[in-house]
Image (spheres, rainbow, N blue to C red):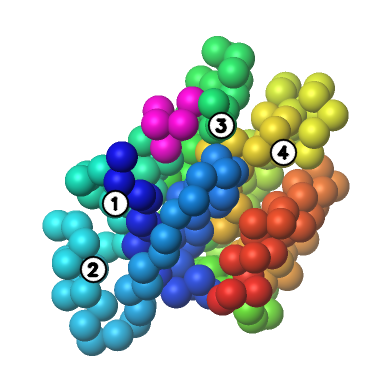
Amino acid sequence: MAGLELVIGNKAWSSWSLRPWLVLKAAGVPFTETLVALRQPNTRAEALKHAPSGHVPVLKHDGLAIWDSLAICEYLAETFPQAQLWPADKAARARARSVSAEMHSGFGPLRAAMSMDVKARHPTPPMTPELAANIARVQELWNQCRREFGAKTGKPFLFGAFTIADAMYAPVGTRFVTYGVKLDDVSTAYVKSIVELPAMKEWTAAA
C-alpha cells in the first residue's frame, strides 16, 4: 500500500487543510505533507497538479487522489477503522456527521468576517445579525453535543474522545481566539481543549 500524502495550504490560513491534517494525527498514521502556497498568482495552477478541483487539501493514497476535507476525513475513517474517527455509538455518530456537514456547507458570514489566521490577533469584527447568528449557532451546537454526548464521557471534546466533528470545528475555535470573540462557559472550555491539543499546537508552531 502506497504511503499517505496530504497536499495542504499555508498553515496560518488554510482552515480546510487543518481539518484532515488533525484527523491524520488522530489516526496516528504516518504521512507526508506537500505545500501549495496560497494567495499566489500560481496557486490554482499548482493545486491543479494534484487534483482537478484546483483546491487544497488533497489526500493521495494508493493511487487515489481524494479532495474536499470531509471526503478525505470519511476516507480516513474507512481506511483506519481502528482509529475510531467517528463515535462508536450509532446516535452519536449520526449527530457527529450532521454537525460536521453543517459546518462543511454553512456559516458563510462567519467565514467571511473572520478568516483563519492562527498566528495573529485581530479586533472583533462588526457584529452583523448574520455573523451573530452564526456565532450563536456554533455555540448552540457545541453545547448540545457536550450536554448530550461528550460530557457524559468525562473527556473534553464534542463526543468525548476527539473525532472528525472536532476537526471540522477546530478552525472555528482558532477564529474565536484570533478575533477575541466572547463565548459561553461550555464553548470557552471546548475552545481551550482544541487549542491545547498537541497536534493543534504543532500546527500553530509550524504556521
| Residue 79 appears in the figure | yes
Dot 2 falls on a residue whose secondary structure is helix
Q: Earlier in the sequence, mark 2 or mark 1?
A: 2
Whichever of callouts 3 and 2 sits on the residue coming sooner in the sequence is 2
Expressed as whole percent of the image width and height from the top left, the position of residue 8 reads 39, 65
Q: Verify CB contact (< 8 Å) between mark 2 and mark 4.
A: no
In the picture, the disc for residue 47 is 2
Report x, y in % for residue 91: 58, 14
Q: Which mark is residue 60?
A: 1
**Residue 100, magenta (yes or no):** no
Measure the alpha-carbon separation of dots 3 and 4. 16 Å
Q: CA distance from mark 1 to mark 3?
A: 19 Å
Name the residue beneath numbered marker 3: 83
Mark closer to the chain start, 1 or 4: 1
Q: Position of residue 32 (x, y in %)?
A: 42, 60
Residue 190, position as x, y percentages in the image: 75, 47
Q: Is residue 140 visible?
A: no
As shown in the figure, which amino acid type bears the numbered disc 4?
Phe
Quarter of the image where one finds residue 166? top right
Q: Earlier in the sequence, mark 3 or mark 4?
A: 3
Start and end of the magenta stretch?
76-81
As helix, strand or loop, the secondary structure at mark 3 comes to helix
- The Cα atoms of the two marked residues, 2 and 1, are separated by 13 Å
- Judging depth in this view, the residue of 174 and 49 nearest the camera is 49
Residue for badge 4: 157
Q: Which image quarter is the N terminus in? A: top left
The amino acid beneath tag 2 is: Ala
Q: Amino acid at mark 1?
A: Lys
Q: Residue at x 21, y 74 (%)?
A: 46
Amino acid at the residue labelled 3: Ala
Single out the mark in the foreground, 1 or 4.
1
Spatial separation of the CA atoms under disc 1 and disc 4: 28 Å
